[in-house]
Amino acid sequence: MTTRHALVPTVLGDLTVVASGDAIVGLYFPGHWYLPPREALGERVEHDGLIDEAAAQLRDYLAGARTGFDLEVTTSGDPLQESVWAMLREIPFGETTTYGALAERLGNRALAQAVGQAVGHNPVSIIIPCHRVLGTSGKLTGFAGGLERKRFLLELEEPELAKAERLF
């Protein structure tokens, strides 16, 4: 099956979901920082079983009715990107980490900036949860979909106890 895409209306705007064969290969926000070339999205489709399932799971997640995704996802980055994206997949719902912590897991804290670039180029936002990565001391930093969307996603996943203790 060929690569194809659809626009999925959500509370975060119309997300572009890209599928190739039986896997999701892209999920992009309006104004996303790092979009693939237009031809890499394939043709636009109105109905596609896989994309429709991804859309349903995204809507459930964004409504707080789902904490993860049951979708085949394929990425094709360089070895560092693939290593970072694999670590992103391991961050549990409601938890966060830092770029530096991911770099340490790779064996070299000096890789934090390269880790940040890999996180920023994650082609399957939300499903591969790059929003769960923060800057030093938990600082909310860059997000290809914008900081307001990152804040929304983090607040959506925030544990109830933490919400109750938050002063804002």
Image: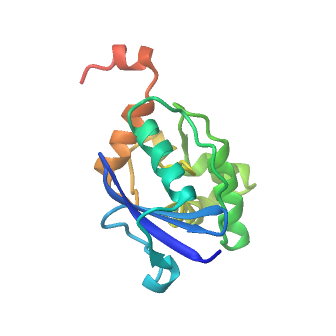
Q: Nearer the viewer, residue 11 or 95?
A: 11
Q: In this view, does 77 lie to the left or right of 150?
A: right
Q: In this view, does 49 lie to the left or right of 63?
A: right
Vertical relation: 117 (above or below) 100: below
Report if residue 5 is visible in the image: yes
Colour setup of the view: rainbow
Q: In which quarter of the image is the N terminus?
A: bottom right
Q: Nearer the viewer, residue 14 or 143?
A: 14
Q: Which residue appears at 38% of the width and 69% of the height?
A: 33
Query: In the rendering, at what x and y percent does residue 104 appear?
Result: 69, 50
Query: In the rendering, at what x and y percent does residue 85 appear?
Result: 64, 57
Vertical relation: 23 (above or below) 12: below
Q: In which quarter of the image is residue 146?
A: bottom left
Q: Which residue appears at 28% of the width and 48% of the height?
A: 148
Vertical relation: 131 (above or below) 17: above
Q: Nearer the viewer, residue 136 or 97?
A: 97
Q: In which quarter of the image is residue 20?
A: bottom right
Query: In the rendering, at what x and y percent does residue 155 appear?
Result: 37, 33
Q: In which quarter of the image is the C terminus?
A: top left
Q: Which residue lies furthest to the left in this view?
A: 168
Report if residue 130 is visible in the image: no
Query: In the rendering, at what x and y percent does residue 39 appear?
Result: 48, 85
Q: Which residue appears at 66% of the width and 69% of the height?
A: 21
